[in-house]
Amino acid sequence: MFHRNIKLIIAGLIVATGIWQFTESNIGNGIFLLLISVIPVFLYFKNEFILLAFLKLRKQDFEGAKKWLAYIKNPETALVQKQQGYFNYLHGIMLSQTNINQAEKYFKKAIELGLSMDMDLAVAKLNLAGVAMTRRRKLEATTLLNEAKKLDKQNMLKEQIVMMKEQMKKM
């Protein structure tokens, strides 16, 4: 696992090599190297292990996702802030199956660090509302459910939100 700034240094070295190839009249090599230099810049903003963990989660392979996330030893130095949010978000999703207390901590940290997509933020708030409901904090759960409903623009979580509101009425 590279420190995030090493990826930018590698991209800079590839660009410098590409420019050198242009000066040596190797235009094809220079163009190829400039195109290849986009990869480390992309991986600076989108961590490769988080992308692989998302792919495993799409297949419901929680153990595989945990394996990929375990490769990130120190998220503060290896990831930019948004990716740290997704690192915590993924941990929260995986732990919500087994340990709700720890999952709550990860979801709160993910929301604090920020998530790029409204849908991910809605899922995190919906999970936090579920945790608040299990702890009999009805006001907090209602607030989180309303926030999740506002963020869910495609109505993908509509059924879960309605179900949780029905359960809250029984409390």
Image: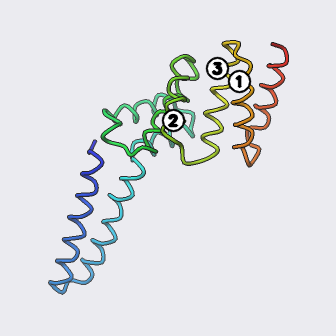
**Labels 3, 2: front one:** 2
Q: Earlier in the sequence, mark 1 or mark 3?
A: 3
For mark 2, give the secondary structure. helix
Instruction: Estimate how packed mark 3 is, as few (under 14), some (14 to 19) or many (20 or more) residues with alpha carbons within 10 Å.
Output: some
Q: Name the residue under label 2.
A: 112
- Residue 95 % position (x, y): 53, 23
Q: Which of marks 1 and 2 is nearer the N terminus?
A: 2
Q: Is residue 132 left or right of residue 70?
A: right
Name the quarter where the C terminus is drawn: top right
Q: Which mark is residue 131?
A: 3
Q: Does residue 121 sit above or below 32 in this rendering?
A: above
In percent of the image, x 31 and y 32: which residue is there?
73
Name the quarter where the N terminus is drawn: top left
Instruction: Estimate how packed mark 1 is, as few (under 14), some (14 to 19) or many (20 or more) residues with alpha carbons within 10 Å.
Output: many
Q: Does residue 28 sit above or below 111 in this rendering?
A: below
Q: Is residue 129 left or right of residue 171?
A: left
Q: Distance between the residues labelled 3 and 2?
A: 17 Å
The three-letter code of the residue at mark 2 reads Glu
Q: Does residue 98 sit above or below 144 in this rendering?
A: above
